[in-house]
Image (cartoon, rainbow, N blue to C red):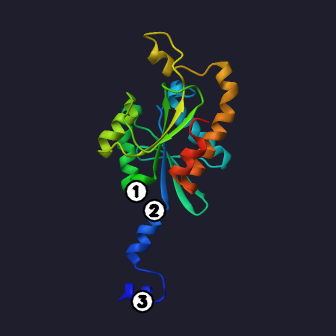
Amino acid sequence: MWDKIRKWLGFGSAKREVQFNTMKKYLVVGLGNIGEKYAGTRHNIGFQILDHLANTEELSFKSAKLGDISSLKIKGRSVLLLKPSTYMNLSGKSVKYWLTKEKIPVENLLIITDDLNIPFGTLRLKTKGSDGGHNGLKDIQEKLQTTKYNRFRFGISDSFNKGSQVDYVLGEWTEEEKTKLKERLDKSAELIRSFVFSGVNNTMNQFNGK
């Protein structure tokens, strides 16, 4: 009866309204490792980008189950920001929990991660793909049972000697990189806002390779 009344009033069904509201919810996840010794390292760029976005919006993170969370509105859309507290290799557990809890569709998920295969500061958004040897992405793929989820890769380059990849990834930015990082963080925040408001295809066209 209630659905008939809502339809007569022009609201549509309650089920469709719930689906519509769900489609306006987003989960943006920055990958990283918890602890002071990892702060400011290349592998933690996902955390760093979310911290930068939160600072520009005058937001703070609070501890919650399996991660630190914050939230904001972007032109009527609800966005949950998540920094998993599970360590990089178990990121999928946190991602799956918050997707399920908040009833967010996987197409509204965005994972932010570092990428050795692209130059420093280069931004690349993709809708699917392999884990590329990244343990965080590997665990997310296993937990979600799909490779079709949006991932925002931030280039950290491969400027390391043979055999020193781990030290490089877990190392801090060079002074030259630090001077360029502020502008790259600003651009990364713009990409996230565009993903939420303009959609993944428009955002790829505008930001990929920039």
Vertical placement of 81 versus 161: above or below?
A: below
**Near-viewer residue (137 or 64):** 137
Can you identify the residue that label 3 sits on? 5
* Whole-percent x, y for residue 12 in the image: 44, 80
- Packing grade of label 1 (10 A; few <14, some 14-19, many >=20) is some
Q: Secondary structure at mark 3?
A: helix
Can you identify the residue that label 1 sits on? 105
Point out which mark residue 23 bears: 2
| Dot 1 amino acid type | Pro
Identify the image quadrant of the C terminus. Answer: top right
Q: Residue at x 50, y 27 (%)?
A: 43
Q: Locate residue 165: give its quadrant.
A: top left
**Near-viewer residue (198 or 192):** 198
- The mark that comes first in sequence, 1 or 2, is 2
Q: Residue at x 41, y 32 (%)?
A: 88
- Packing grade of label 3 (10 A; few <14, some 14-19, many >=20) is few
Identify the image quadrant of the N terminus. Answer: bottom left
- Packing grade of label 2 (10 A; few <14, some 14-19, many >=20) is some
> What's the CA distance linking mark 3 and mark 1?
28 Å
> What's the CA distance linking mark 1 and mark 2?
7 Å
| Dot 3 amino acid type | Ile
Point out which mark residue 82 bears: none
* Whole-percent x, y for residue 74 in the image: 60, 57
Vertical placement of 201 versus 156: above or below?
A: below
- The mark that comes first in sequence, 3 or 1, is 3
| Dot 2 amino acid type | Met
